[in-house]
Each structure stands twice: as structure tokens, then as C-alpha cells.
Amino acid sequence: MKNKLFYIPLFLTFHLALSQDSTLLKSQVAKSITELRDFVAIPNDALNGDAIADNLIWLKKNFNARGFNTTELETENHPLFFAALPMEDTKPTILFYMHFDGQSVDSSKWNQENPYQTVLKKPVDGGYETMDFEALNDDIDYNWRLFGRSTSDDKGPIIMFLNAIDLLQKEEIKLPFNVKVILDGEEEKSSKPLPKAVKQYRELLEADFLLIADGPIHSSEKPTVVYGCRGITTLSITTHGPAKPQHSGHYGNYAPNPGFQLAQLLATMKDKEGRVLIKGYYDGISLGEPVQNILRSVPDDAVSIAEKLQFKTAEKVGAFYQESLQYPSLNIRGLGSGWIGKKARTIVPESATAELDLRLVPESDGTRLKKLVKDHIVKQGFTVLEDIPSKEERLRYDNIITLTEGSVTDAFRTNLDNEYGTFLVNTLQKAFNDDVVQIRIMGGTVPIAPFINELKIPAFVVPMVNPDNNQHSPNENLKIGQLAYGIKAFYQILKTEK
Ligand SMILES: [Zn+2]
């Protein structure tokens, strides 16, 4: 693409500060858009091994072009991509994590023909209008967006990183860090080989801290640093009535009803304001003054959350949104018995099931919490089995529960006063002249938590993309302004001495 912005006398670039609107940054953004289109055009569905291989070829070429040494790390599944700039012993090392695979696409749900062919759109009242890429030759509007699979999650950040390296090399800046990069090709299907890879390639991955560039910035659109993510585990509990559904006329009032059994049990688990009543569930969590101050500094707006989700009063596990995320949750994620709606039948159902998920924090080991819930169920007078009860068991016990447990993905959390966290916050604050939102722990779970816990180094998520990017959904997009943001964020982090 011809871009008049490229013809800037070089000497100027050495003295210009990298402001968001600088021609230097804008011309790099223009280049990065071309490169992103090229990268997005390679399908990256993690379920397709050939696609992942094509992406690895692209990565090798484009990291090598910037002077990185690259290699593929064999794992029990797809290889991981590893790149590093030449190392110097005296410098601290940053390990960057991003992923190049994407969620599967259903083209019929996208407002464009091919989700792997990036489309440029500008916002017009209430929607978007498709633009020709030529329109970028005159000027780059930071409000315009690039639509395509993985523009945001997570090829966009890889492109931002590479283009930040370009800027640094153009300016011949000597980096105060050693730089290592690990790129995951199966994040969207749980990154299963990662923790093992750490054991196998520990020396290669050694670093002073890990920077994860994935996920969106805070909804206030301010620079964001995230110190941790909650973990997760699940439980499925089923109560049992008669072995087969029975006529509610003949047996209502007589055959035990599994729906009521389950409802009564669930009601003992929480108070009316959403707090878990199971003893020990919140043990070990204390939020001192400094932590409280950071939690309160996050510019969440309780009113707009309530408006968006449409409810009157929030639960009371925490006094406000961020505080509520510091505790493990106990959530009914699904509930079922008999038939409902037009299909409702006049029966006493044979069973009722509640699917529970438990979001974990570092203080609340998932195995311990599952045991607490199980012990609580026993205390309520239930006989807990692992399978559907036999006839014998049905005749022997009242109140039978079948309980099955899901696996545990741990939480991770780096201390708020970690020196590298402070470095990142200060660097972003200076770069963007804006407050940095510090999230002590994100509500969601990332599959790379076991990898982080295995690496045993401080880890931070530094998100780069817009909060409304439709991640994992049709019409995923990246705001061009966020592309500029990410290039600048990587650039400043890499050139700033700690
Ligand atoms: Zn992602």
C-alpha cells in the first residue's frame, strides 16, 4: 500500500515523542494493518492441525525478519512457537505469551463473506459501514475497525508486538531487557501441552517475568494491568425420585419429588444475599487496606453494570464488584428436571440436576472446596453416590444424591506490590498519561494458569484490545486505535529501563 506518511525525513523520528497522533506511530499502524490482514488470512482454527502449521511458517518468517532466533517446541500435540532476541546475561528477561490459534468460525453468522479476509469498517450511527482499505492512505482514523477472526484474539497483539520491535529497531534503541516470546497454537482448546512444556523447556523459558498479551482492556478503556485470574472447578449433583417419572395424580403427595429435594438442598448453600453458608468456604481470604485501595481504584460503575445486566440489587459477597471477585464463587450454571414450558408434563420426575461451577482464588484450593460442598451435602442428610443409584440403594436410602466432580484449573495471582507490576503500571501511566486500571484478579479463568504456576515467575496480563471486540463470536474486530495503543504499549515497555 502506498502511504504518503512513509516519506518522513528520518531525522525527525529520532526526536519526536511517540504521541498517539505522531506520524511515526501512524505510519507504523498503517504497516501493521497490512501485516495483520496477511496474518489473519491464514485460517487458525485450533481444531485443524494443518492450519496451525501454516501459521507457524508465517511466524517463523516474520520473527526471523526482525532478527529473532526462532524454534518450534515439540509437545504432545501442536508445537509451540518460541522466539528470542540475542541474550545478554546482565539484563532482566521478559517472556511474552500470546496465542495464534482462534475459535472456529461460522461464516453464516458474520456480516462479511470470509472471517479470514479482514474487512475495514467505520462506525455510522448504530452500525458499521464497510470501507475500502484505500481510504487509509489519506489518514488513519483510530475509530475505524478491522473485522476478522483473531484480529483481537489474539493475532492483533502479536502484530502489535512485531511492529513495536520495528519502531525500536528503526530508532536503533538498545533494549534494557532480554526478550523471549512463547506463542501458543491451542489456547482456544485449553493449552493442554503448556504445563508439561515448561518442565521440558524450563531453561529456554526462564525469565524474570511473564507478560501475557491477551483479552480486552477494562471497560473504561484505560490502560490495564491484570495480576491474576480466577481458577475453576465444577460439580454436578442429581437428586432422585421414583426410578421412572410417575403420574402426578396417582403419586403426587406420595412419591418423593427430586425437584423439591434439590431446591431445599441448594437453599442451604447460600443466604439470601448470595453469600455461601458452607463453613470454611471463604477461609484464608483477607483484604487489607492496600489491597482494598487498589480494588476501589478500579473505575467500575455499579449503576451501568446493573443497567447492562438488568437487575436491581447485586449480591453481597463483596461490597462492590472488584471485591466480589476476590472470593471463590458457588454458581448454579444449569438446573433441570422433567420438562418445562409447552412441553411440561403432569409427572413426578425421576431426577433433578444442578450443575455448579466454583470459581477459585489462590486461597481456595478447588479440591478443598469440592470436599466442603460434599461434606455439607452429607450433613443435610443425603447419601452421596458417584453413580445412578441401583434398585437396592433406592430402597435402602432416602435422599440420594449422585455427585460427579470436574477437574480443577487453578487460579494464579501475582502480588500487587511486585516490582515488575509497578514497572508496568508506571510505564503505561507515563506512556499514555492516564491512570492505569489495576485488576488484582480477573473473574474469568485462563487455560494457561497451570503454565504460569509451573513457571513460578511473576505474571501479568497486559491486555491490548478493545473491550467490545466480540472475542470468540461472529464479527470479531479490533479498533485501529487499539492497534496504535498496543504498538505503543509494547514499545514503551521494551525501551524503558526498570
Ligand atoms: Zn485469547
Image (cartoon, grey):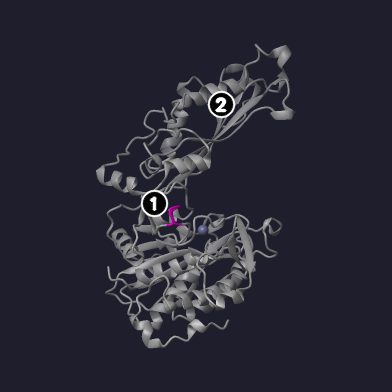
In which quadrant of the rendered image does the C terminus lie?
bottom left
Asked whether residue 220 is drawn in magenta, I would say yes
Residue 172 visible in this rendered orientation of the protein: no
Q: Residue at x 48, y 80 (%)?
A: 64
Q: Amino acid at mark 2?
A: Ile
Secondary structure at badge 2 equals strand
Q: Give the extent of the magenta segment.
A: 217-221
| Secondary structure, magenta segment, majority class | loop
Direction from residue 314 to residue 106 in the image, left or right: right
> What residue sits right under mark 2 in the picture?
401
Direction from residue 76 to residue 338 in the image, left or right: right
User: Which of the 4 image quarters holds residue 275?
Assistant: top left
Q: Nearer the viewer, residue 356 or 82?
A: 356
Q: CA distance from mark 1 to mark 2?
A: 35 Å
Q: Residue at x 45, y 80 (%)?
A: 66
Residue 324 x, y percent position in the rendering: 40, 39
Q: Nearer the viewer, residue 251 or 375?
A: 251
For marks 1 and 2 on the same chain, the one whose residue lies earlier in the sequence: 1
Residue 292 visible in this rendered orientation of the protein: yes
Secondary structure at badge 1 equals strand
Residue 98 x, y percent position in the rendering: 47, 64
State which mark lies toward you, 1 or 2.
1
Dot label at residue 228: 1
